[in-house]
Image: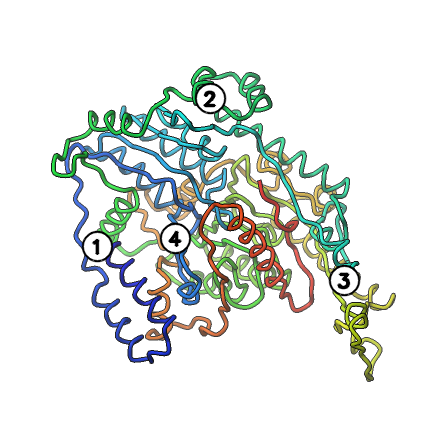
Amino acid sequence: MRFFWKAVAANLLAIVLTLTVLGMAGVVGVMLLTVALKGQGKEILVRPGTILVFDLDVNISDSPEHGYPNQLLSGAQTSRLSLFEVTKSIEAAAKDKNITALFLHGSLESENYGSSYSALREVRDAIGVFRQQGKPVIAYLENPTVKDYYLASAASKVELYPFGVLSLNGMASESMFLGDALKKYGVGVQVTRVGKYKSATEMFTNDQMSDADREQLTALLTTRWGQVLADLADRRGIDIPTISLLANQPGLFLATDAVKNKLVDKVSYYDEVLKELKDLAVAEPETHSFRQVELADYAGKLDSEREDAAKAWSAPKERIAVVYVEGEIVDGESSANTVGGDTLARHLRELREDKDVKAVVMRVNSPGGSANASEVIQREVRLLKDAKPLIASFGAVAASGGYWISAPVDYIYAEPTTITGSIGVFGLKFNFKDLANEHGLTFDGTKTATYADMDSIAKPWSPGELALAQTFVDFIYDQFIEKVAKGRKLDVDRVREIAQGRVWSGMDALKLGLVDGYGGLADAVNRAAEKAGIAKDKIILREIPDKRTPAEALLNELFSDEKEAPLAKAGLAGIALPGRDPVSVALRQWQAQWRQLQSLNDPHGVYALLPFQISF
């Protein structure tokens, strides 16, 4: 299969890159092999009586894989499918006469805002489309998390492993606080901020949550959890008060108790489920199994068919572009898990000038970041909106800088569980004077102007410097307020009232006028097509960044004349740490904290960023 050969080529290239002592000749040889093997795989044939198999051991991201060359050096990567690949495959399978059923199994991965409740809600809707065609959907779970169960509950039958435990124990938010540790080791921290609820800086100054932060997160969690319970109750035929009571006591269910409480339909061993599936498909005696196709392979087949159809289409190439804004916003160029202001602005500028692109959808799944980069992006957003229809679709989170860049668009879709808002700004100043002095290191110097050494890490801000920094933060906040008011057509005083750095759920954001309606990525694409006068059956999508593996990205860097950032600017993405054991989980958490510190590269040290490491 095409995907098999691409994986082989990518792995071979990764091996050779890590063995650079063998010389560039070996690297080039493997590159040539990669090119030779690409696209030579066996075609995916879906015959009558085939079951579509969705292995949930995957990270469902907003954007398609767009590997960065440095990812080849970072070890194994979590399997990844884009939201569009998943939903469009399931919806296409619903109409495919050769597909008889859908089978879900495994446990979801969740990295960098992937497999969010917002994305899973769209997948559940696609499963609903499949069921509407009268085709069965069977989900088999072993030890499901709340997210696993939320997705699986959309199936027509949910079965649980006899020794499995089902989790329905709610949502929690937990942050790490470094305030006492930094004081202990002599690291000084000074904060400039605007917004009662702008709590991102508390990680560096406090030893616990502030009352304001606890208030906003409690309200956010309550709203999000209420929506999840409502969706579960609807699909499982349980009233909301009952399922809410079950979530509170006991919250964790043995298999037999899960059946008793109507959370699942049956307790089964895997071989028993396979026997059920054989009755729904054509048997394949040579494999002692049944006809099946993996969702990833089926998605690849659909991609190839869409590409062929687009090439054969004789009409003008009127396209809808989907631009993915996934990750923290940083100054400069994009790299793995970050959105570079310069990179995204360049993409938006190209789309504005591309006559074949008739409308644009901006899919935002970002907590924000650099205020400077956010404004670089928003400038291009405003220009693009003046040139052609521009719709925003919010994923798991579109807050702070993520909201900043979205405010001017024509229409904003969000899910009820989307985290949005956080209209606030902060600045940070670290100094290591006491830490250095403790170890016998001292600093001295001279200057030609009062504030020449304002950025020095060897001293804290003076009262005058602190006031100057606060003035700049106040300016950025006022600009943020005015841009939201203008983009959303709201009164400035009203925006100030609902801003204050507070995060809101999509449900609350709709009531406040921060978003325009509920809907997912497909809804945004359809609206963009309607605004551009393109019929739904004639939509041709262009996705940016386009789909590439890390190996393909490296080949492009070396052999393409595309005007993208040089390889040296991307930076190392970090070491991938697969596995769910406690050590790996802890290391991944520390790695994420370190990545966030690395992303603090605004030239003025000012950020429109969501509180650090909120995880639900």
Measured from the top left, where is residue 307 in percent x and y?
Answer: 25, 54
Instruction: Answer with left or right where residue 104 lies relative to residue 307.
Output: right
N-term-proximal mark, 1 vs 3: 3
N-term-proximal mark, 3 vs 4: 4
The residue where tag 3 is placed is: 185
Label 4 Cα crowd, 10 Å radius (few <14 / some 14-19 / many 20+)? many
* Residue at 44%, 73% in the rendered image: 567
The residue where tag 4 is placed is: 64
N-term-proximal mark, 1 vs 4: 4
Residue sticking out furthest to the right: 463
Vertical side of 564 occupied by 379: above or below: above
Q: How is the image coloured?
A: rainbow
Instruction: Answer with left or right where residue 174 lies relative to residue 117.
Output: right
* Residue at 27%, 63% in the rendered image: 9
- Closest to the observer, 403 or 585: 585
* Residue at 32%, 54% in the rendered image: 318
Q: Nearer the viewer, mark 1 or mark 4?
A: 4
Distance, label 3 to label 2, CA atoms, is 53 Å
- Closest to the observer, 349 or 437: 437
* Residue at 44%, 54% in the rendered image: 323
Q: What amino acid type is highlighted by mark number 1? A: Ser
The mark found on residue 234 in the picture is: 2
**What element does badge 2 sit on?**
helix
Q: What amino acid type is highlighted by mark number 4? A: Pro
The residue where tag 1 is placed is: 314
Measured from the top left, where is residue 473 in percent x and y?
Answer: 74, 60
Q: Nearer the viewer, mark 3 or mark 2?
A: 3
The mark found on residue 232 in the picture is: none
Q: What amino acid type is highlighted by mark number 3? A: Tyr
Vertical side of 46 occupied by 570: above or below: below
Q: Nearer the viewer, mark 2 or mark 1?
A: 2
Q: Are marks 2 and 4 in contact (CB under 8 Å)?
A: no
